[in-house]
Amino acid sequence: MHNQSQSFRDSTISTARELEIELEELPDWYCCGAVYPLRSEDLISLLSPTRNLMGAKKEGKELVTLCSACYQVLKRTNYLILNDADKREKLNNYLEEKYDGSTKVLHFLEVIRKDVGWEELKSKVKTSLTGLKAAPYYGCLLLRPQKELVFDHPENPTIFENFLQSLGCDIVDFPYKTECCGAYLGITEEKVINSAVLKIIQGANKRGIEVLITSCPLCLYNLEAGQKELMKSGHISKPVPVLYFTQLLALALGLGVDVCHFEEHQINPLPVLERLK
Amino acid sequence: MEISIEKINYELREAIEERSNQKIINCYQCGKCSAGCPSENLMDVPPHEIVRMLQLGLIDEALEVNSPWFCTSCFTCLSRCPRAIDIARIMEALRYYNLNDVFQPFDPNVLSDEVKTRLPQQALVSLWRKGT
């Protein structure tokens, strides 16, 4: 986030300040590992997320994440520690201090819902985004498996819609909102990304969607890089810019384009956003 | 493909069940996983057929197909499975048994500078985690 997604970081920090949500960077944080280990004996990969959870516990705070992948890994790790006594004990044997699973993991969207509320958010909007045809792109990692994440409905979630409604956007019903973008496979198997992105973007074009919003840096990268490839090969004619939800929030709260770092994007969203001013 | 009771590698099948923590026999082949799988068109064998192969004891055959390498762990199959089988976990277990045969560690130097500067670190970490 400090390195390649400054747009996500800065827009979140400034919007949190504006909404009077107190965020503090976790001291000595670790990379969560990006994927939740699926083999039942793979406990070593759970150590770094557990250390993050323990760090938040030491601070006596809730652990807020922005990225969908971090959310998935941290929340599932916590679920395992809470519900599997055997694994909890094994994990604790590796750790300097005992951890019991008591840290609460929240996504920044959940924080906005809890601390501000959708109605209240509506009243804080300075630049209404009325007329902007936006649709959410949830991806996979925020939603599934639902039993462990308990974030929203695994295939028909609505939290982003509520969020967009508060900002005044014209929400477009988007059936591809929970499709997979191809994830890390894009590095080695380009065709996975291309076939996934083609489906998503054609669907977006058909519905006249002007901007897609997401909370996952990898979804954003795949959707942008995939679109660039598909433009070159002539499979799609009209690219759809992809934004982090916090960037749209920053614009709506009147925080200006500086915190959004639109220069990071491979598909320039400014032409679409220009007319909102 | 020959199906025979002599061919069943019970030990390996049990190991796959244990590593994935899934009961393979629970599947009744409705095919919803394959219907919703985003990578199904790229797989040699769709997900429900992999499970069927494991049920029938065709373990060696299941280890030969490319399907596990195209699984992105998006959990669409799990969310739709009426028997709550986590196929992503089964795929992960199959990948594990396949690593020694086909796996070559990914070399990030093959990426272009453009990709290197933009690609989220998350992608590389995931790839290495899944492939080691």
Image (cartoon, rainbow, N blue to C red):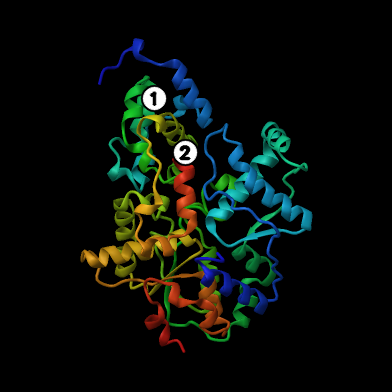
Whole-percent x and y of residue A45?
58, 41
Q: Give the left or right position of residue A60, taking residue B125 as reference.
A: right
At horizontal 53% and vertical 86% (from top left) the residue drawn is: A127
One can see residue A186 in this view: no
* Amino acid tagged 1: Leu
B75 or A72: which is nearer to us? A72
Q: Secondary structure at mark 1?
A: helix
Q: Is residue A164 above or below residue A41?
A: below
Question: Quick one: label 1 or label 2, which is nearer the N terminus?
Answer: 1
The residue that mark 2 highlights is: B132
Determine whether the residue tagged by mark 2 lies in a helix, strand or loop: loop
Image coordinates of residue B118 in percent, x first then y, are: 42, 64
Quarter location, residue B80: top left
Q: Amino acid at mark 2?
A: Thr
Q: Which residue is under mark 1?
A: B54
**Is the residue at mark 1 from the same chain as the one at mark 2?**
yes
- Local crowd size for mark 1, using a 10 Å CA cut-off: few (<14), some (14–19), many (≥20): many
Identify the subunit bearing mark 1.
B
Q: Residue at x 32, y 43 (%)?
A: B40
Please state if B114 lies on the left or on the right of A144 as rendered.
Answer: left
